[in-house]
Image (cartoon, rainbow, N blue to C red):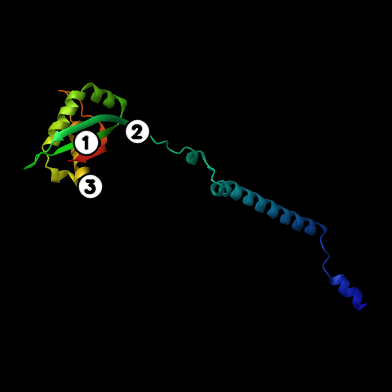
Amino acid sequence: MATSSSAANAIPAEPGSRRSSKLMIGLLLAVGLVAVGAAAYVLVPRFMGTPATAETAKAPVPEKPIYLMLDPVTVNLQSEGRGRFLQVGMALRVRDEQTKARLVEFMPEVRSRLLMLLSNRSPDSVVSPEDKARLAEEIRKALSAPLSAGAPELGIASVSFNTFVVQ
């Protein structure tokens, strides 16, 4: 009888508890799979090189530069002894088409400003790269000044030399 009393004292298993633990495990697996899928959706495009969001898809498009090529300018330099000259070909990078059109319209005055600025140089003041960079900035400032009374300052972004000969 001892065996029957120990069997009587045992707690009977509930038939629904086994089903609820299987349901809980299934639910946890489903949540885990959703989390893995969401992580893959966010992270995989970054590793594959494709944008994950619309913000990264809209990369800024660089503006097309607007240049105005100037004919080469040749000037006599201020030198003692033998005559020396400077020949410079350049391009002006302008901010918009209106500035380019205005410079073309006033080209005789633009070239005159260049001649006056360049002819006051000594041969030694235009030899080193630093001297050329300084000269380019001086040209940019001189040509950015208004071309007529009441006109706005011109938008010249930079000056690039195409040819630069000191002889």
Image disc number at residue 129: 3
Vertical arrangement, residue 128 with respect to residue 11, above or below: above
Mark 1 or mark 3, whichever is nearer to me = 1
Q: Which residue is mark 2?
A: 65
Q: Percent x, y for residue 5?
A: 89, 74
Q: Which residue is mark 1?
A: 88
In the image, what residue occupies the spot 25% across and 34% down? Answer: 90
Say whether marks 2 and 3 touch (CB < 8 Å).
Answer: no
User: In this view, which residue lies farthest toward the top?
Assistant: 105
Q: Amino acid at mark 3?
A: Pro
Q: Amino acid at mark 1?
A: Val
Q: Seen in the image, is 89 located left or right of residue 11? A: left
User: In this view, which residue lies farthest toward the bottom?
Assistant: 2
Q: What separation in Å lies between label 2 and label 3 (alpha carbons)?
A: 24 Å
Q: Seen in the image, is 49 located left or right of residue 142? A: right
In primary-sequence order, the first of circles 2 and 1 is 2
Vertical arrangement, residue 45 with respect to residue 140, above or below: below
Image disc number at residue 12: none
In the image, what residue occupies the spot 82% across and 63% down? Answer: 13
Q: What separation in Å lies between label 2 and label 1 (alpha carbons)?
A: 21 Å
Mark 2 or mark 1, whichever is nearer to me = 1
In primary-sequence order, the first of circles 2 and 3 is 2
Quarter of the rendering occupied by the C terminus:
top left
Rendered image quadrant of residue 20: bottom right
Q: Percent x, y for residue 84?
A: 13, 39
Q: Nearer the viewer, residue 162 or 158?
A: 162
Q: Secondary structure at mark 2?
A: loop
**Other-residue count near label 1 (Cα within 10 Å), few / some / many at <14 / 14–19 / ≥20:** some
**Other-residue count near label 2 (Cα within 10 Å), few / some / many at <14 / 14–19 / ≥20:** few
